[in-house]
């Protein structure tokens, strides 16, 4: 499976055993991407996870 990085337009290969909600890193720009859906294949920038619990 192939898709395109929404950040830098690089071709990204998705492992065939990838699952929805899995995070992958763009090999080109290193941005974290989340697999939103597998059929059709759709990825989006992963939400930034910061260790801020708001306390
Ligand atoms: Zn990229």
Image (cartoon, rainbow, N blue to C red):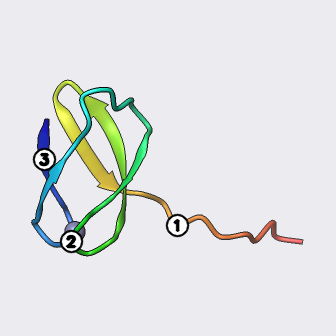
Question: x%, y% of residue 8?
Answer: 16, 72
Q: Secondary structure at mark 3?
A: strand
Q: What's the mark number on residue 28?
A: 2
Q: Nearer the viewer, mark 1 or mark 2?
A: 2
Which mark sits nearer the N-terminus, 1 or 3? 3
Asked if marks 1 and 2 touch (Cβ < 8 Å), the reply is: no
Would you place residue 2 above or below residue 19 in this image? below
Quadrant that contains the C terminus: bottom right
Residue located at (25% from left, 65% from top): 27
Q: Earlier in the sequence, mark 2 or mark 3?
A: 3
Q: Quadrant of the N terminus?
A: top left
Which residue is pictured at 81% across the width and 66% down the height?
53
Query: Which residue position is annotated with label 3?
Result: 3
Residue drawn 73% across the image and 69% down it: 51
Query: Is residue 47 shown above or below 40?
Result: below
* Residue, disc 1: 48
Secondary element at tag 1: loop
């Amino acid at each position: 499976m192939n898709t395109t990085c929404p950040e830098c337009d690089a071709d990204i290969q998705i492992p065939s055993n990838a699952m929805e909600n899995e995070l992958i890193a763009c090999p080109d720009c290193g941005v974290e991407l989340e697999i939103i859906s597998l059929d059709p294949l759709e990825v989006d920038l992963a939400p930034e996870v910061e260790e801020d619990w708001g306390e």
